[in-house]
Image (cartoon, helix red, strand yellow):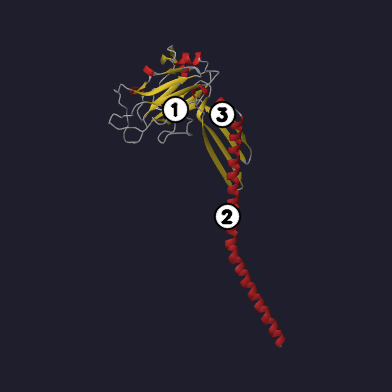
Amino acid sequence: MQNNNNKWFALIVAMFLMVITNLLALYLLEYIIPFSRNTKWMENWTKAYYEANKWIEDVLFSMKKEDAYFETGNTMTGSNLWYYYSLTSTWTTIPITLDWTSEFDIDYNKISISNPVQLLLKWNIIWGNVNFYFKVPQFDDSWSTILFSWWTDPIINWQLSSENETLNSSWSQIMYSDICNSSWCTSWINFSSKNWYTLTWTWKTFSDFYTDENCTVSWCILKLSVVNELLTDDFKKMPYLEYKIDFWTNPSIANYYAIIRTSWKSTWYRKDLKLYIPQQTTIEAFDFTVFQ
């Protein structure tokens, strides 16, 4: 009888220890399983990020292989169930809407004294169809800012350069009266008939210079520079202006920035990356530094 009691006691102790062990195991699993899931999620997130970054590097390498790849109008795209990549380098409007913008208007880029605009041009552009818009940024929704309409000094200087010659704006610069107010911009500037003398004192219009210097075959550079203070009608100073260029029916133009987009999926995660590559804006004839 004593032996039977000992057996039952040992069985009860064993069952008690098994229950305690199972409870401890369940308690630990409550921490281990979420941690394991988090580890898996982190693994998928990391994989998605580095795979997306790999496509960024692949596109950059392709751009490096071909001289001025994105500036000649090339684009790249690729996709399947798990990834997507694209290179956008040309457009008919600068900037690309909803992509590279100022803080206050999604359709405009910024130009200031410290931030001039330089564009590489190499297409058969019909300049009579190209419209330039310049306006004051809207810093306050309660009122519109207008630049001095009576100010006689120029505000933006333009310069068109080929490898052999340069046409400066001088007396055909953009004036204060040409700048739109901050609420809307329905008026535009057309450079086609703007004119002045070249470095060799030859009088030419903007369009004639572009054609005569063979800019449709070799690179030419258009530079826009703010040359005076940006004063408002209530004696305030603006830090910059906003600009947009609409090439309309012309072929797509090399954008100020090439945009690389990549996306990679890994189970529950998808990582999207975007990279802006500034357009190269120098040619050999102007490969020097000016100190002043």
The location of residue 34, given as percent across then percent down, is 58, 58
Mark 1, secondary structure of its residue: strand
The location of residue 68, given as percent across then percent down, is 57, 27
9 left or right of 90?
right
* Quadrant in which residue 11 is drawn: bottom right
Mark 2, secondary structure of its residue: helix
Nearest the eye: 103 or 168: 168
Question: Disc 3 designates what residue?
Answer: 70
279 left or right of 291?
right
Image quarter (top left, top right, bottom left or bottom right) of the N terminus: bottom right
Circle 2: residue type = Asn
The location of residue 213, given as percent across then percent down, is 50, 15
Mark 3, secondary structure of its residue: helix
Image quarter (top left, top right, bottom left or bottom right) of the C terminus: top left
Label at residue 38: 2
The location of residue 280, given as percent across then percent down, is 52, 28
Label at residue 117: 1
Disc 3 crowd, CA 10 A, few/some/many (<14, 14-19, 20+): many
Q: Is residue 131 visible?
A: yes
Residue at the bottom extreme of this rendering: 1
Please tell me which residue is depicted at 56% across the width and 25% down the height of the picture: 72
